[in-house]
Image: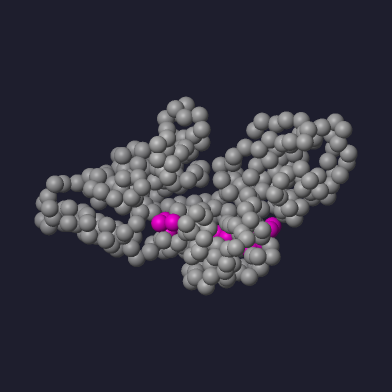
């Protein structure tokens, strides 16, 4: 990270996780000794003193390479580095009684199994009916402890992606979990059905990702140095089961870019099954026989969204510091889809061609 001597401004760079804000400051020679939380609150816009205190408690407030308490007094020449969840005002966002599939809940966090079709946070065209609206209803103190449009949200799943998510219930847990996602010390595994017979039993896709140059609703995987705005992105995958014209794979994220799995798999010719945005909603691999076409159309109806599920999430708990792992069951649309492909694969010579 670039640094500059503090002169009324500071240097910020995008983190690997878009929901985490990374700030680096070098204190100038004339700075008086003041509490670091007070100093940062006066210098960094839109961040409350409480959030800097929570960052210190989570060991995300670093001075000269070492974590410090919020009472630490800054000194000339100090190198300050802090990770904090990005704030967004949520005025006008109303609590809504939307059912949540809660896997686990305690005083620090809530683990849910998000269904496909549920938008995580409000945005253009989606100011109601989101996970945030549901959280504001189910977890009353989120309003008191978070001043964010995305209260407690430290990571995201696409609207049509199902699976396990963690939400923080207080400022300390939010900062603690945000640090894990930023530093990639947690565990995230996804199951997805992709088109084609994936070559090899495992592999890694290392292609930087940025906005598509002509379609701003899409992301695109570029070759190294092809796009200076593209961010380092790495996806590891391994084959779980082969179905001939489709493959069930497990993906592990090394980075957390927007649409990363969907973009990366499409970039190597294996788009996620029924992914409308990245070309998976047409027959990519297979035969010309009408029975096969009908089979695929039936599969699209069985799982009318991208076949991508966040299966496993492992995190260090904010309070007791134990590593805990949550495994979410596949929703019926994906499990039915996989079973259809499994049956097809076993009997296609007799039944489909």
Q: Residue at x 47, y 30 (%)?
A: 227
Question: Which quadrant: the N terminus?
Answer: top right
**Percent position of residue 123, x then y:** 52, 55
Q: Is residue 110 magenta?
A: no
Name the residue rendered at 59%, 41% in the picture: 15
The x and y percentages for residue 217 are: 42, 45
Which of the 4 image quarters holds residue 203? top left
Look at the image and tell me whether residue 111 can be seen: no
Task: Find residue 161 and report its horizontal and vertical position in percent.
Answer: 42, 56
Magenta segment: does it hold 170? yes
Nearer to us in this view, 302 or 111: 302
Please state if 231 lies on the left or on the right of 282 as rendered: right
* Residue 78 position by quadrant: top right
**Residue 27 seen from this side:** yes
Image location of residue 179, percent across then percent down:
63, 48
Instruction: Count every numbered label the image shows and give the total.
Output: 0
Residue visible at 25% across and 45% down?
284
- In this view, the residue in front, 296 or 343, is 296
Classify residue 244 as left or right of residue 307.
left
Residue plotted at (61% across, 47% down)? 20
Q: Nearer the viewer, residue 227 or 257?
A: 227
The answer to whether residue 350 is above or below residue 62 is below
Q: Quadrant of residue 347?
A: bottom left
The boundaries of the magenta stretch are 159-173
């Amino acid at each position: 990270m670039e640094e500059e001597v503090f002169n009324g401004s500071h240097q910020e760079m995008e983190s690997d996780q878009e929901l985490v804000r990374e700030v680096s400051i070098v204190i100038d020679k004339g700075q008086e000794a003041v509490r670091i939380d007070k100093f940062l609150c006066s210098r960094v816009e839109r961040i409350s003193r409480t959030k800097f205190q929570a960052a210190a408690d989570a060991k995300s407030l670093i001075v000269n390479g070492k974590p410090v308490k919020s009472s630490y007094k800054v000194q000339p020449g100090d190198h300050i580095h802090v990770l904090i969840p990005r704030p967004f005002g949520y005025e006008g966002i109303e609590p809504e009684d939307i059912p949540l599939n809660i896997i686990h809940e305690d005083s620090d966090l809530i683990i849910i199994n998000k269904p496909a079709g549920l938008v995580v946070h409000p945005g253009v065209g989606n100011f109601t009916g989101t996970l945030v609206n549901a959280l504001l209803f189910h977890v009353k103190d989120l309003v008191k402890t978070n001043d964010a449009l995305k209260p407690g949200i430290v990571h995201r799943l696409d609207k049509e992606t199902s699976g396990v998510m963690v939400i923080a219930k207080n400022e300390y847990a939010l900062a603690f979990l945000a640090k894990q996602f930023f530093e990639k010390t947690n565990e995230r595994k996804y199951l997805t059905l992709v088109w084609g017979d994936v070559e090899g039993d495992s592999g890694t896709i290392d292609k930087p990702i940025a906005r598509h140059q002509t379609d701003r609703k899409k992301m695109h995987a570029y070759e190294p140095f092809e796009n200076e705005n593209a961010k380092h992105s790495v996806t590891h995958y391994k084959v779980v089961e082969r179905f001939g014209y489709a493959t069930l794979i497990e993906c592990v994220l090394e980075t957390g870019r927007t649409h990363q799995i969907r973009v990366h798999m499409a970039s190597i010719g294996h788009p996620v099954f029924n992914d409308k945005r990245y070309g998976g909603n047409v027959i990519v691999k297979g035969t010309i026989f009408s029975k096969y076409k009908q089979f695929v159309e039936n599969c699209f109806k069985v799982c009318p969204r991208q076949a991508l599920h966040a299966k496993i999430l492992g995190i260090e708990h904010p309070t007791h510091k134990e590593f805990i792992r949550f495994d979410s069951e596949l929703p019926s649309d994906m499990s039915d889809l996989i079973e259809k492909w499994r049956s097809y694969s076993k009997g296609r010579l007799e039944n489909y061609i």
